[in-house]
Amino acid sequence: MGIAAGVTYYVIDQHDGGPSFSLSAERAEQAVQAVVDECGSDVHEIRALDYQMTVVTRAKDNPDHWNEVVVQHRYHKLTNDGAASIQPEENEYFDTTQVDWDVITPGMVDEAMSHLPEGDLGDLSTHVTVTAIDEHTLERYYWREDFPMPRDLEKYDAESFEFFHDITPDEGRPVMEKMIAAAPLATVRIYLGHDYGHVSLTGNTDGEILDIATG
């Protein structure tokens, strides 16, 4: 076990030989469940690599702060030591118990794989990131263009808000809340890379594919 600033690492079995976190739904679920059992299910971000998973989770002893836990290899031992380097916004988290990892891997990983250039894959790297929906993602993929953003409630006073948006803040707030509630739990980003190129896929925990880029 070694400790670095803000992160606690558990290096248990360097030659595990089992499936990677990023390619096995079962193994990803087991690692996340270990975090849930210790810290609860409120999570801002999960980063699943081949043999390492990093989870930004709400601090058990201080719900206003977030810890970053790194799990490596087949044993899932966790700690609350170490704050996340970037603290999420107050509403930027999701409930991990509502995430179906079969939708992500192999489902969305297979979709990304189908867009890789043909040929000898060489050393394939796979990164899967699941992140709470933020305002930028809402605006880009899910927000109605004719409706004000939540930040406008703070940007304008009540009179100016009504002048610019033709509705009162009291009329706008419940519609905003309904739109936010209807958005998926989190954004899913998958990166696959090998000697011949790479592909980046953006989707969500509902399995919807939003964008695919290759290079």
Image (cartoon, rainbow, N blue to C red):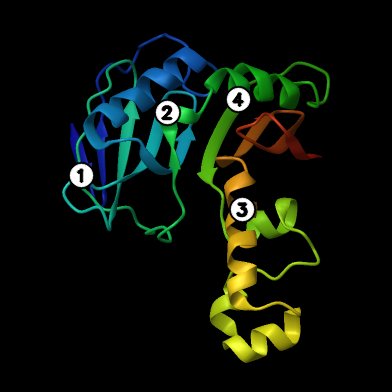
| Residue 205 in which image quadrant | top right
Residue type at mark 3 is Lys
Residue visible at 47% across and 37% down in the picture: 47
* Mark 1 closeness class: few <14, some 14–19, many ≥20 residues within 10 Å: some
Residue at numbered disc 1:
60
Q: Secondary structure at mark 3?
A: helix
First in residue order: circle 4 vs circle 1: 1
Name the residue beneath numbered marker 4.
Answer: 104
- Residue, disc 3: 178
Q: Earlier in the sequence, mark 3 or mark 1?
A: 1
Q: Are marks 3 and 1 in contact (CB under 8 Å)?
A: no
Q: Residues within 10 Å of mark 3 (few under 14, many from 20)?
A: few
Quadrant, the N terminus: top left
How busy is the neighbourhood of tag 4: few (under 14 within 10 Å), some, or many (20 plus)?
Answer: many
> From mark 3 to mark 1, how far is it between C-alphas?
29 Å
Q: Which residue is mark 2?
A: 97
Indicate the position of residue 37 as horizontal and vertical percent values. 25, 27
Q: Secondary structure at mark 4?
A: helix
